[in-house]
Amino acid sequence: MAGDKVTGTLVFTIFTTVLASFQFGYDIGVINAPQQIIVSHYRYVLGAPLEDRKAIDSYANNSTDEMPEDLYPGTPTPTPGTEEENVASAGLITMLWSLSVSSFAVGGMIASFFGGWLGDKLGRIKAMMAANILSLLGALLMGFSKLGPTHILIISGRSISGLYCGLISGLVPMYIGEIAPTTLRGALGALHQLAIVTGILVSQVVGLEFVLGNADLWHIMLGLPAARALLQSLLLLFCPESPQYLYITLEEEAKAKQSLKRLRGCTDVTKDMTEIKKEKEETLREQKVSIIQLFTNSSYRQPILAALMLHMAQQFSGINGIFYYSTSIFQSAGISQPVYATIGVGAVNTVFTALSVFLVEKAGRRSLFLIGMSGMFFCAIFMSVGLVLLDKFTWMSYVSMVAIFLFVSFFEIGPGPIPWFMVAEFFSQGPRSAALAVAAFSNWACNFLVAVCFQYIVDLCGPYVFFFFAGVVLAFTLFTFFKVPETKGKSFEEIAAEFRKKRGGDPSPRPKAAVEMESLGPTDNA
């Protein structure tokens, strides 16, 4: 059908939009490669004698050249009687590095609640342009971090970049879902995750020592996102606004039709407008839904629980642990440059996310999610077996290596991309903004918890750690099988009926008056 074809405007708009998702991935990965260099810089600046510290500040502020090799990145020679100070300094540096990493997730958690609100207030395009101000500011703070108190500038820059990524984690899936043709909604929605993993891969490549991951250029690597923010802001000027926003929020039918004509490449957009008008009728009937109502109203309780569980499954699956362990396992397998093997994992990550873009409209969302989770369950077991038996059989390291690549592949086929856009399909216009905000917050909060707790879990479980994650993955797989419906090609009414059926209720649609009264009621604990 004409309305379902991929047009040049749609391609340009999607590409421009997922530049934000690319930034999300880049910010996730960029801090890892230069870790030792940045920590060394913290250690020197904070641990050097006062006169040396003044010399560094003076040199940094009055010269564009690199600091002398004997000052940076080396550690100052301890003087007698300063051993306790050095221990305290080491603890301080560990804390500062931890803040440098985790402040990104804290910023994301805070801002994730406001992405939908900002999109409704300013419109999707203007909201993304406004968010780019945060991206630009964060990148500039980190890019110029050598010229001032490095730790303060990097932690501040990471926090502000986290605020940006928190906003776009709600804005991007919402905007793509609203401009995509119904038959391509899943495939185009998966591009958000594809752009994220591409950003992670690029950050790994850029972080190689001979590229930007060295003592001379690491600050440039952290500041590169400023160029992306400016580029996307320029390109957004040529992107059409969301037809749903124009018609449902602003009541501008003529502008909504014009936007659809640009996106669909045809003059007859009757079918799309009919769907949007129907959605507006639903919105008027449902009114605006608050976050509290998502949990107190029985119509939304089951979908929001499923949405939260999908995002928790994504973060608690152990995928971050896989990346954490990959380099050491590659080292034990005798690979002289494990960093390249880790980049190989990132490449596999990207390839299989691209594959999911093509599979999601053929196999269905729920099916791919279950296939991915099931595969990850078995890979986690093989991963743990390889780690446990590594001392007895050296070839077990190769079992773990294969398990790593397969684990990542299964993750990106289903649990990686699907939660981001499946949540938008669970809800109609009324509750969608609140649901996306809650889901994004859940994802960021789980991300933060994994970052904080993973090392403690490793210390507790040792090489058995992935048996623990296998159990977690199995629990989420069973929940998805019994509680999450398929959304491929289904309307919101059909999806709601599926939820009622899984809850054990009557799957037939309820009278409109009953739906209206229920949505307007303050609480319903049925």
Image (cartoon, rainbow, N blue to C red):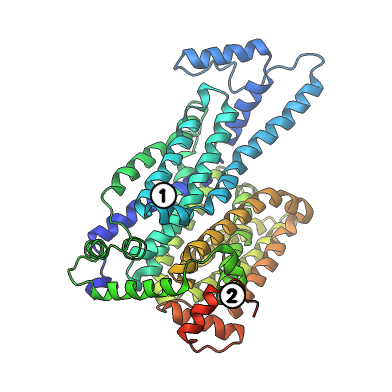
Question: Callout 1: helix, strand or loop?
Answer: helix
List x then y, in percent, for residue 454.
Answer: 69, 52
| Quadrant in which residue 266 is drawn | bottom left
Q: Which residue is mark 1?
A: 20
State the SS at label 2: helix
> Is there a contact, CB below 8 Å, between mark 1 and mark 2?
no
Quarter in which the N terminus is drawn: bottom left
Q: Which of 508 and 417 lies nearest the eye of the viewer?
A: 508
The amino acid on which the numbered mark 1 sits, given as a three-letter code, is Ala
User: Dot 2: few (<14), some (14–19), or many (≥20) neighbours within 10 Å?
Assistant: many
- Say which residue appears at 44% left-offset and 77% top-offset: 492
Q: Is residue 62 left or right of residue 9?
A: right
The answer to whether one can see residue 272 in this image is yes
Residue 20: x percent and y percent?
41, 49
**Which residue occupies 74% across, 59% down?**
464
Name which residue type carries label 2: Gln
What residue is disc 2 on?
302
